[in-house]
Amino acid sequence: MIVTRQNDLNHACRALWRATLSMMNTYLSLRGPARRVMLARRIARNFQTLERESFMFTPDSRDAFTRLSRRWAHLAGWA
């Protein structure tokens, strides 16, 4: 049972990572500042989740998620 939950978490983290990459690409094509801020907030939250929940990623990757979370929070006006 624990292995299945860990497997499910790993799949969810990979899916979240792919979705976040897609959102980052979308961010580049948006023109409206309000939409960009809202998307930047979502991206920052995704990186916070990945940083916190993704034990399948290496420590270096989790450190990168921390930096990216701060960067996107800044773009969202949170910093």
Image (tube, rainbow, N blue to C red):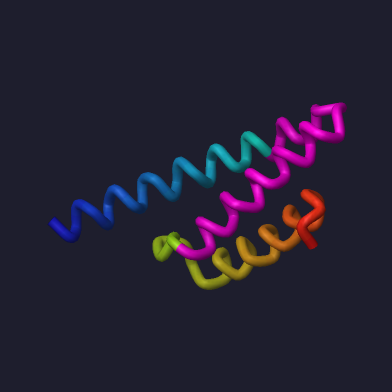
Vertical comparison of 11 with 31: above or below: below
Residue 28 in picture, x, y percent from top left: 80, 34
Residue 79 in picture, x, y percent from top left: 79, 62
Vertical comparison of 39 with 76: above or below: above
Q: Is residue 3 left or right of residue 61?
A: left
Q: Residue at x 36, y 52 (%)?
A: 10
| Number of numbered markers | 0
Quarter location, residue 30 = top right
Vertical comparison of 45 with 29: above or below: below
Main SS of residues in magenta = helix
Asked if the stretch drawn in magenta spans residue 44, the answer is yes
Q: Nearer the viewer, residue 38 or 67?
A: 38
Residues drawn in magenta: 24-52
Asked if the stretch drawn in magenta spans residue 75, the answer is no
Q: Nearer the viewer, residue 41 or 5?
A: 41
Q: Residue at x 86, y 27 (%)?
A: 31
Q: Residue at x 34, y 52 (%)?
A: 9
Q: Is residue 79 left or right of residue 67?
A: right
Residue 60 in picture, x, y percent from top left: 57, 70
Looking at the image, the residue that sits furthest to the left is: 1
Residue 41 in picture, x, y percent from top left: 69, 47
Q: Residue at x 13, y 56 (%)?
A: 1
